Amino acid sequence: MGIRALLSEPLARYIVQQQQEWISRSIEVQEKWRKDLVKKALHTQFGKDHFFKDINTYSDFQEAVPVHDYEDLHIYIDKVKNSEEDILWPGKPLYFAKTSGTTSGTKYIPISRDSISNHIDSARNAILTYIAETKKAQFLDKKLIFLSGSPVLTETGGVLTGRLSGISNHHVPGYLKSNQMPSYETNCIEDWETKLDKIIDETLDQPMSLISGIPPWVQMYFDKITERTGKKIKDVFPDFSLFIYGGVNFEPYRAKLFESIGKRIDSIELYPASEGFFAYQNSQQDDGLLLLLDTGIFYEFIPVENFFDEKPKRLSIGEVEIGQNYAVIVNNNAGLWGYSLGDTVRFVSLNPYKILVTGRIKHFISAFGEHVIGEEIEKALRYAMERHPEVEVIEFTVAPMVNSGNGRLPYHEWLVEFAVEPNNKEQFVADIDRRLTELNIYYKDLIKGSILKTLELVPLRKNSFIDYMRANGKLGGQNKVPRLSNDRKIADELININRQ
């Protein structure tokens, strides 16, 4: 066992002990963070505008701080971008994390000196927690690859600015720098396909043991390696033993990704975002993600069905229930207040508090009142794939077809890029549709009432989603295609690309 692996074990035990301490006081810890955040931001412009000096209770906090999205905070963030200080958080941010917004173009999410540890330490702790549970640490002595955005940073109002993954690259611990891949120069390449070819050049003959990245882009990495070598990934990288991922639901990719590898390996799911690192899988025994309640974030939760109410009720951690879908609201030590992430989660444990990410609050189909969410379509697809084991799905998205012409009933259109298509397409569609009616009573009623007809499946040619992402300047990095949408913008563009 090498020195990195040897030293990691006592540190892993220490981290888990710390973890158990705050887990045992989860509600108390969250209340402490609420008070600390308000106290520290008391004299910021946001704190003055929202009368932080009068906040004593959680009820006071809810009255003073409304739920915001990025557009609502834009006026404050613009001031920070113009080099003003003490706006959302004391001083100026350490970084701006640039991310794509759906309605606001590029978003600039502040990361402060206080909040950077949430991003960096949480990623480290996910790995250490895995080591503590499994006693597997030898992978630390081999090569580790993090498929991420460019670490090149620019300046915005005197604040270093870049993609979150690029910012994080500057904080990789020194003891891992020597075995981190790809090289800094390769990581700086902006064009994803050029960068990927260079990454393969650098890694093919290396003892890769850990690979981390968003599943679709890791799959592309694997596919290109197999094209070059004609081998399974396990034969190219016999030391590969741990896959770390986040950003999208892994299930639609799982079968093809492990088929590409050629063996089952351990994996760790993360829940990071520019706004914070929120949770990670802390056990190989279940899929739940441990919600990180002691890292500078005060969480609130709104039941999904109430999110669009004029003044929805917000719940603290002590008020949540297992099985309910919630929209996530964060308040953090970088100056985000009442900030709606747009994500939805479901609690699968309250001791400790563990979640599954179920979708996006704005990514749903309710063209006919069905309110189908991402978790439901992913479960329906997984159900069908289990019954048709030959099927391999590369990527998919779902959209409503409201006006199909010729007097036909409207329906949901599934646009799917297959690696291997179903032998019986009609039965595959029927299996998806049957499971969806079991998961969503509104969808079932619309089907039974002949308001909707059974979904239609449109197989797309190879690389349709890659071509779509390339055409929209979002190929690689942390970008992904929404699983479903309530309009046809993405669907129609994909169909046009598919015809080319």
Image (tube, grey):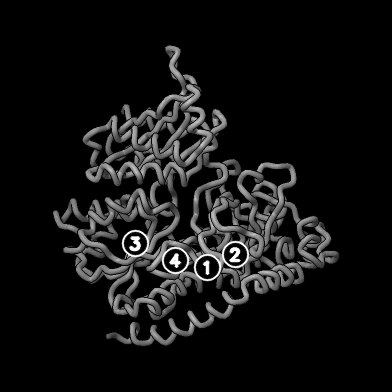
Mark 2 or mark 1, which has the lower sequence index?
Answer: 2
Residue 93, image x, y percentages:
64, 65
Which residue in the protein does label 4 denote? 281
Mark 1 or mark 3, which has the lower sequence index?
Answer: 1
Badge 4 crowding class, 10 Å Cα cut-off, few under 14, some 14 to 19, many 20 or more, is many
Label ID, residue 111:
2
Q: Are marks 2 and 4 in contact (CB under 8 Å)?
A: no
Label ID, residue 69:
none
| Kind of residue sitting beneath label 2 | Ile
Q: Secondary structure at mark 2?
A: strand
User: How far is mark 3 from mark 2, CA to CA?
Assistant: 25 Å
Which residue in the protein does label 1 denote? 119
Q: Does residue 424 sit above or below 19 in this rendering?
A: above
Mark 3 or mark 2, which has the lower sequence index?
Answer: 2
| Kind of residue sitting beneath label 4 | Gln
User: In the shown orientation, is residue 88 left or right of residue 25?
Assistant: right
Which residue in the protein does label 3 denote? 186
Q: Does residue 220 sit above or below 185 in this rendering?
A: above
Front one among 302 and 126 = 302
User: How far is mark 2 from mark 4, CA to CA?
Assistant: 24 Å
